[in-house]
Image: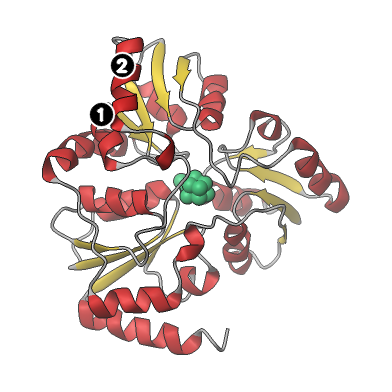
Amino acid sequence: VPLHLPWIDAIRRLKRERGAVVMAHSYQSPEIFHGVADVTGDSLALAQAAAECDAEVVVLCGVHFMAESAKILAPKVKVLIPDPQAGCSLADSISAADVRALRRRFPGRPVVAYVNTSAEVKAESDICCTSANAVRVVESLGVDEVIFLPDRHLGAHVASRTGVRLHLWDGRCEVHETFTRAEAVHARERFDARLVVHPECPQEVLEVADFVGSTSAMGEWIAREQPARVALVTECSLADNLRLRFPDTEFIKPCNLCPHMKRITLPRIHACLRDLAPEVQVPEDVAARARLALERMLDVGR
Ligand code: 13P
Ligand code: SF4
C-alpha cells in the first residue's frame, strides 16, 4: 500500500485539474477501486453512470467494451481507457457479420447482446443486457424465442430462469469457464462457506450455488445475508474489494485473475490523465445503432 500512495495522490490531483471522473469495474484492484475511483460497480452500474455523466472527462478503469459503452452513452464526454488492449474473450468471440448470419438462420427472433461485445455487434442487436438484468431483459421482450449472444453459460442460465427458448452462440469467458463443480463444492465443504457464483461460470457450478448474480448483486446479497464465510467464484479482486466493505465476513477465494482487467494500473491511469489519451472513439453511424440497444436495456433497468 505505501508504494501506491504517491500514485493515488498524484491521480487525485490530476483528476481535479482535468475535471475527470474515474469509473472502476468491480474487478479492478483495490488500490484503484478504493483508492482513485469516483464510481464503482458492475457493468450495468457503469453504463448507468455514463448515461448520466456530465463530466468533461471519464477514465474508464475496466475493459475496452465498457469504455466503448460509456462513449456511446455519453458521446460528448471524452472517454479515456488506461490500456486500450484490455480486451475480453467474450467480446472477441463474435463479429457483426456473425450476428447478421444468426439473424438469417433464425429470422424474426430478436437479438439480445450481452454488453461484453464490441460496438459493432451491439449495433446489429435489438437490445443489450448485463449479468444483472439478463433475465428481465429477455422477459421484457414477451416472445418465445430469442437469439442470445455471446456467452453460452449466461445464456443457459437465463434459459433455466425463463420459459424462453434461447438460440446461443458459443462464446465463453476465459476467466469463469475454467471453474469446476468440484472446486466450488470443495470451497463450501472445506471452509463451511456460502457459495456465490458469477453466471459466466458453467452450469455445473451454478447448480451448486447459494446465489448467482452480477458483481454488484453479489455485494448486495452479502449485505442482506451477512454470511460468516463466503466463497466468491469469480475474478479475484471482487473479494479483495468487498472485504473492506464487510469486515465481519470472511472471504474465501476460489478465484481466477482476468488478465485484461489487470492491464489497468495506477501508473497507466496517471499517464492517461496526464496525456488525455488514449481516447475511445466509436464511429457515429455504429454508435447511433448501438445506443438504441443500450438505451433499451437501461429502460428495463436493474
Ligand atoms: P458484471 O456485469 O457482473 O460486473 O460482470 C462483468 C464481467 O466482465 C464479468 O466477467
Ligand atoms: Fe471478459 Fe471474463 Fe475478463 Fe469479464 S472476466 S472482462 S467476461 S474475460
**Relative side of 266 to 300, left or right:** right
Question: Which residue shows up at 24% across the image and 51% down it?
Answer: 51
The residue nearer to you, when weighing 284 against 127, is: 284
Secondary structure under tag 2 reads: helix
**Relative side of 83 to 276, left or right:** right
Residue 209 place in picture, x, y as percent: 70, 37
Looking at the image, is mark 1 or mark 2 earlier in the sequence?
2
Q: Which mark is residue 124?
A: 1
Question: Which residue shows up at 49% across the image and 87% down it?
Answer: 5
The residue nearer to you, when weighing 255 against 195, is: 255
Q: Decide: is 229 above or below 247.
A: above
Q: Which mark is residue 103?
A: 2
Q: Is mark 1 within 8 Å of ligand 2?
A: no
Residue 142 place in picture, x, y as percent: 35, 15
Residue 245 place in picture, x, y as percent: 58, 66
Question: The C terminus lies in which quarter of the figure?
Answer: top left
Which amino acid type is shown beneath numbered disc 1? Glu
User: How many numbered dots are placed on residues in this image?
Assistant: 2
Q: Decide: is 252 above or below 16.
A: above
Which amino acid type is shown beneath numbered disc 2? Arg
Asked if residue 106 can be seen in this view, the reply is no
C-beta proximity under 8 Å, tags 1 and 2: yes
The residue nearer to you, when weighing 66 against 20, is: 66
